[in-house]
Each structure stands twice: as C-alpha cells, then as structure tokens.
Image: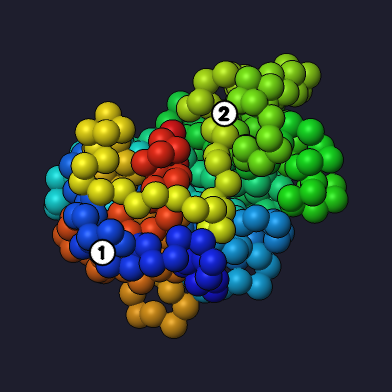
Amino acid sequence: MKDSHSPTANQGKFRDPQHTADGQDRARVALTHPETLWFNTGTLCNITCANCYIESSPSNDALVYLTADDVANYLAQVRTRNWPLHEIGFTGGEPFMNPQIIDMARLSLEAGFEVLILTNAMLPMMRPAMRNGIKALNAAHPGKLTLRVSLDHWDERRHDAERGTGSFAKTLKGMDFLRDAGIPMTVAGRALWHESDTTARQGYADLFARQGYAIDAFNPARCVLFPEMDLSAEVPEITTACWGILNKSPDDVMCASSRMVVKRKGADRPVVLACTLLAYDPQFELGETLAEAEKDVALNHPHCAKFCVLGGASCSA
C-alpha cells in the first residue's frame, strides 16, 4: 500500500496527532451525530482505475470480504449503543464481487435503515443472481435502496481514460438496467478535468436526459463530484482556531457522523475506522467495536484538510 504521506509535499506536517508543525493545537472531531455506518465489503474489484484512492484491483485483497454475520454483529451493536443511524453504506472494491452483498443489504434494510451501495455497475452487478437480488430488495423495501454509480466523467473518452477502454459503455448498460428496473440511483464523478462545476453538471445533465436517467445533475447529493485526493498537493493543517476562521463546525466533517468497518487480510475480526478515505493509515483504526469507535479523531492527514474541511466533501447520501 502507498505511504499515507507524500515524500515531498507537506514536509513536517501531519506528524503529531496533538499539535501541528508550528506547535498549535490540532483540530479534533467528536462523533456527535452518527448517521452512516459504512462497510467495506473488500478491496477486490473487477477493474483497476488510474486514480483509485483505495487501490482496488482484481488482485488487491488487503481488505478481505466481510460476511453477513459481520454485518449482523455490527447492526446489533448499533442497537446496543443507540446510534441514531439512518443509513448503511457499502463500498469496496466493487461490492457486487462479494457473494454475500445481497444478504448484507437485506439485513440492513430489514433493520430499518436506508441502504446505499457504491458500484461501477459493470459485470459483477449484472450477473443474474445480483440483478434478481437487487430487484427483490427494491420490491420489498421500495425507496430505501439506492445505488451510487461511479461515472468518472460524462464524456466516454475521459471516463475510459480512468477506468479502461469500454468501461463507459458497460457502466451505462448497468445503469440502463437500474433505470428499467426502477432502482433508485445516483452518480459519483470526479473533478479531474479543470472544467467548472457548472460545465461538468451540464454535461452530466445532457447525458442523463439522453439516457432517461431520473438523476438531477445539479443536485450535489444526487450527482456527487469528488475532488481528487492528491497527496502531492500542499495543504494547510487544521487547528482548533480554524473552525472560527473558516466559519465551519467540526460537526460538519465526515468523522463526526460516520464510521467504516473493514476486515484486514489475516485478521481474526473486523475493525472500525474513523474514515472511509483512510483505510490503510493505522492512526485512524479505532478498535473492533462501535463502543471503541466513539473516540475523538485527530485531523492528522492531508485528506482531512483538503477533502473534508476545506473541500466540504461527504460520502453519505
């Protein structure tokens, strides 16, 4: 796995969880309103993307498959801890490569939660068992299941530059299935091409109109455009004084409202992480239980600053 810090950028920064490089108190975030519990179903994926933040690929099993029993255990902990969740999220890798994804989603829906599954909508999702499972879940829990499809750009050439030749067409085929089956879907794209937000959203809007997808491209919750997580970029550290300077609240940062469960290769049990974006940095591993995961999180990584505090990004629906 890549080192969590660039060898050239941010020299001297993001080393001490208590203090910034210039000696100020580092900002910390408490879990004040848990809304989303994420499950990383495993880092295996059917494709290798050029800029995958978690390095998913057909050979990367650093995070192994979770099971339905794992999910059931954490759902029971949610009840015990009285977490006011409204959403269970599944990410990867490609979640539909995990043979138990339908069972895991069913358990979450039956527990009363909305379910969000992140997918590239390609061949793993399009297997008959998966398609039938998705349709059955939607029929049993209408309006509670959403699939967020990774569509890096509205232009086929640019999308395929990230995900491989032919991937755009395969993803649209999967989205056509979701459209025809009446499965709610949203899109996640990337802000990689130096175009304005308005231009990018208009491009997606035109594509959605042509394909008949009921997705509002101008709604950031329905068409999420993520900034690129470039570790070579110089970013400021976030101090306790920054909240007032930026007119932001720590409650707005993702780690105030979410946690992610993963299982590392060779581990006996899953663990809970502070963040969906930092699966390999040990300082963001909080423990095996949700009780342990209620501790504060030090914003001691460039992603904390650029992606979450300054970028205002969120992975939830």
Please tell me whether residue 304 is drawn above or below residue 217 in the rendered image. below
State which mark lies toward you, 2 or 1: 1
What is the quadrant of the N terminus in the image?
A: bottom right
SS class, disc 1: loop
Query: Where residue 183 appears, x then y in whole percent?
Result: 58, 30
Residue tagged by mark 2?
223
Q: Is residue 78 left or right of residue 201?
A: left
Which numbered marker is on residue 180? none
- Colour pattern of the rendering: rainbow
Q: At 84% from the left edge and 47% from the top edge, which residue is drawn?
A: 166
What is the quadrant of the C terminus in the image?
A: top left
Badge 1 density bin: few <14, some 14–19, many ≥20, Cα 10 Å: some
> Alpha-carbon distance for marks 2 and 1?
34 Å
- Give the number of marks: 2
Answer yes or no: is residue 230 visible: yes
Which amino acid, by three-letter code, is at mark 1?
Answer: Pro
Query: Where residue 17 appears, x then y in whole percent?
Result: 25, 64
Answer yes or no: is residue 208 visible: no
Please tell me whether residue 72 is drawn above or below residue 32 in the rendered image. below
Q: At 44% from the left edge and 46% from the top edge, which residue is drawn?
A: 306
Please tell me whether residue 128 is drawn above or below residue 153 in the rendered image. below
* Quarter residue 293 falls in: bottom left
Q: Nearer the viewer, residue 208 or 280?
A: 280
Q: At 72% from the left edge and 23% from the top edge, which residue is drawn?
A: 203
Query: Where residue 197 appears, x then y in whole percent?
Result: 61, 25
SS class, disc 2: strand
* Disc nearer the start of the sequence (2/1): 1
Q: Which residue is most to the front?
A: 22
Which numbered marker is on residue 17? 1
Query: Where residue 214 appears, x then y in whole percent?
Result: 62, 19
Q: Which residue is most to the bottom?
A: 266
